[in-house]
Image (cartoon, rainbow, N blue to C red):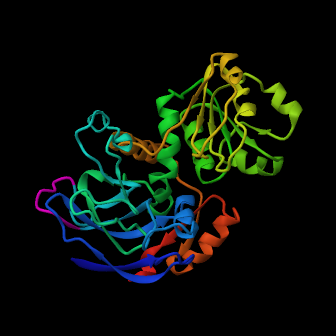
Amino acid sequence: MRTTVGWGADGTAPTLRRTTMERRDLRPDDIAVRVDYCGVCHTDLHAVRAGDRDGPVVPGHEFTGVVTEVGPEVSRFAPGDPVAVGNIVDSCDVCPMCRAGQENFCHEFPTLTYGGTDRRDGSTTLGGYSREYVVRDRFAYLLPAGHDPAAAAPLLCAGITVWEPLHALGVGPGSRVAVAGLGGLGHLAVKLAVALGADTTVISRTAAKTGDARRLGAHDLLVSTDAEQMAAARDRFDVVVDTISAAHDLGPYLRLVAMDGTLSQVGHLGPVTVRTTDLLVGRKKLSSAGSGGRPATAAMLDFCAEHGVAADIELLASARVNEALDRLQRNDVRYRFVLDLSDLS
């Protein structure tokens, strides 16, 4: 085994502290990555502060860094290569979903970057809030030239989460897209929809983010609490990407969807109640998506490099990780915290 340092929580502790952790010795198809930048996701906040954890946790599942060592069977990477790793680090390889390049839907459930179970030795995976990560080479991605590695880190979770429905639903020039919620997911959904050529609108509770929406490339902002605006926008959008993380009524958003259009719900992943008539009138569809398979993730990174798409970030020294979690809980970030792990050296 090899050791590294990172930020972890033991038991039910609600804060992270600097800790030493073990990484496995490289298997033949592994690479070792020096983690330079790791995004802070709402999933991390929940993992640390939910109070129902079973054992220690090291969060972090969207990170970039540099390859430091490769296993003897690895040919895709060499020491010194810039790479990115997302929230999936292994899958069964043999189920229909894996064979289709949708490892995110693996029938045996994919191995998650932290809090998952290693498929070979049964150990619990520890995440990217650390200075080193050892990962199967198939689940690392060469970071294309042109990316700022800090601003690219959130693409590996927030970015791919919204890329998946936009790409699957065929968004492109002439598409009318609305993005509900302008946070970590939502701001990247706006940037990607605009880069794909769609006429893009932000849906927000107030007009306060109109300036940000315009800066991100949106053509309009629709205030969801304004009944007249919502009524005027009925049946307007081919795709509505709902990134709102709290439980909410989907009805008002379904009524914005055009005939044969789709509401893709990627924010709140808990139970929802839908009135059948909100789908029936207009043959509307309700869908969801989560993460992405290896081909889609690689394509998303290439697309973002080509079109200059990256997250709007606030970069913090990793020693300020608990401050980042506190502020994230208050929604005090525009739009993604990224930790600089160099202070762990």
Identify the residue shown where x is 45% and y is 46%. 291
Relative height, residue 199 to residue 35 (above, below):
above
Query: Looking at this view, is 146 or 84 the one in front?
Result: 84
Q: Is residue 75 part of the magenta span, yes or no?
A: yes
Number of numbered tags placed on the structure image: 0
User: In screen coordinates, is 229 left or right of 82?
Assistant: right
Quadrant location of residue 95?
top left
Position of 277 compared to 19: left or right? right
Q: Does 3 appear in magenta? A: no
**Segment tinted magenta in the rendering:** 69-76
In which quadrant of the rendered view does residue 34 lie?
bottom left
Q: From what the image shows, is residue 106 above or below residue 27?
A: above
| Spot occupied by residue 82 in the image (x, y as percentages of width and height) | 33, 61
Residue at 60 percent of width and 23 percent of height: 174
Q: Residue at the location (55% across, 55% down)? A: 311
Magenta region, mostly helix, strand or loop? loop
